[in-house]
Image (cartoon, rainbow, N blue to C red):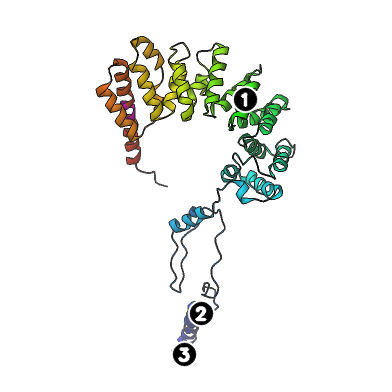
Amino acid sequence: MKKLFPVLALVLIAVLAWYFSTAPGTDGAASTSSPSQPAPKEVSGQSGNDRGPSSSPLGGAVTTLEEEDDEDLEDVDIRPATEIYTSAEDALKAVKAGANTYDDIVLEQFTMLDPKCSWCPAFYESVRELTFSPSSTPDQRSFYSELLAISGRVENVSALVDAIKNAPNQSERDIYSEALELTIGGDEVVKYLNESMATQDPQLKESLVAAMTNQGSRLAAELLYKQTMEAGDADGYYSLGIGLGEFVPEDEALPLLQQYALQRDQYSHLPMKALLNGGLPGLRIVFDILESSSDQEADKRLLRDAVDHVGYDEETEAYLKQMVQSAKNPVAVAFAKQVLEDFQGDLDEEVLDEGEEEPED
């Protein structure tokens, strides 16, 4: 019994130490923040999937991952940069930080800024310097180049075109070319792109056509069609995934595209595809064109590779079903059926994909 006493004493001491170290309100290693010491606020932009749920021995509410994700979304500021920053210095600081992680949110903030922005000229001058600086990494150079392309300003797009022409190596040339393809802007940008297409440089020409394809305006549709006609190429860059056949028109461009399609020449399949890219309004025009035709072989040529250009939604599906029942042109009926079959095939694939079990880790 005497031999056991020291052991029992040690056990009792250990139990008491454990109790006091875990009791609420103590300063032991196992204690957590008290009500007077709130937990630190989460850092903005941190992914909710990187954090586990927090808990408190004091009975506090447990924060779920979904709640943390919602908090992160609230921290994302996608307002135009002109509403966020008040100087070129502040804007440039944000852009430099965004370039290090290729932050898409920053790019969205700087898309097509207000032309009346007072600090923008100085800001874009600095961005151009960073874009072409030897100290910029390829990823940073790509980020800055894209920011110039989406600025909607002719001087920035022009800087990219000049950079492609004068690039010291193919790697940099590719960076500027890929950025130029993302160009967006108004009519002044569209006119500049069109004027630059006189180049004999194939890579630059393709990037300019891709940039024009992005625009969607009536003027862009008109100039793309003229470029195709002048080149005498019935493919119109379609095989490269650019050009009038991949053009997504704004409503104002639809009547002009209809006019081009009604010419029923070797180029007319391109405006037909563009009309279909325009959603249900364009689809209705396509069926009007088909219903007014008596040349079924010409109609089939107009619809070459056109099925994939019809986007699915319930209204479009309903309209196509209506055309299957009411259209007089057999080619129109066959086209409607083919698109509906394609829709069903896509839906079946989605169901199969959703039914597949996720692989075990």
Occupied quadrant, residue 304: top left
User: Which mark identifies residue 25?
Assistant: 2
State the CA–CA distance, disc 1 to disc 3: 102 Å
User: Which mark identifies residue 274?
Assistant: none
| Residue that appears at 35% across and 21% down | 287
Residue position for label 3: 2
**Earlier sequence position, callout 2 versus callout 3:** 3
Q: Amino acid type of disc 1?
A: Lys
Q: Is residue 29 above or below residue 82?
A: below
Could you tell me what secondary structure mostly forms the magenta stretch? helix
- Name the spot of residue 191 as percent of width and height, x first: 62, 25
SS class of the residue under badge 1? Answer: helix
The residue at the far bottom in this view is: 2
Tell me the quadrant of the picture where the N terminus can be found.
Answer: bottom left
SS class of the residue under badge 3? Answer: loop
Is disc 3 surrounded by few (<14), some (14 to 19) or many (20+) residues within 10 Å?
few
Q: Is residue 108 magenta?
A: no
Q: Amino acid type of disc 2?
A: Gly
User: Which residues, given as a range, are shown in magenta?
Assistant: 340-344
SS class of the residue under badge 2? Answer: loop
Q: Amino acid type of disc 3?
A: Lys
127 and 62: which is toward the camera: 127
249 and 130: which is toward the camera: 249
Q: Is residue 312 left or right of residue 193?
A: left
Residue position for label 1: 191
- Name the spot of residue 70 as percent of width and height, x first: 47, 55
State the CA–CA distance, disc 2 to disc 3: 37 Å
**Earlier sequence position, callout 1 versus callout 3:** 3
- Name the spot of residue 254 as percent of width and height, x first: 45, 25
Occupied quadrant, residue 28: bottom right
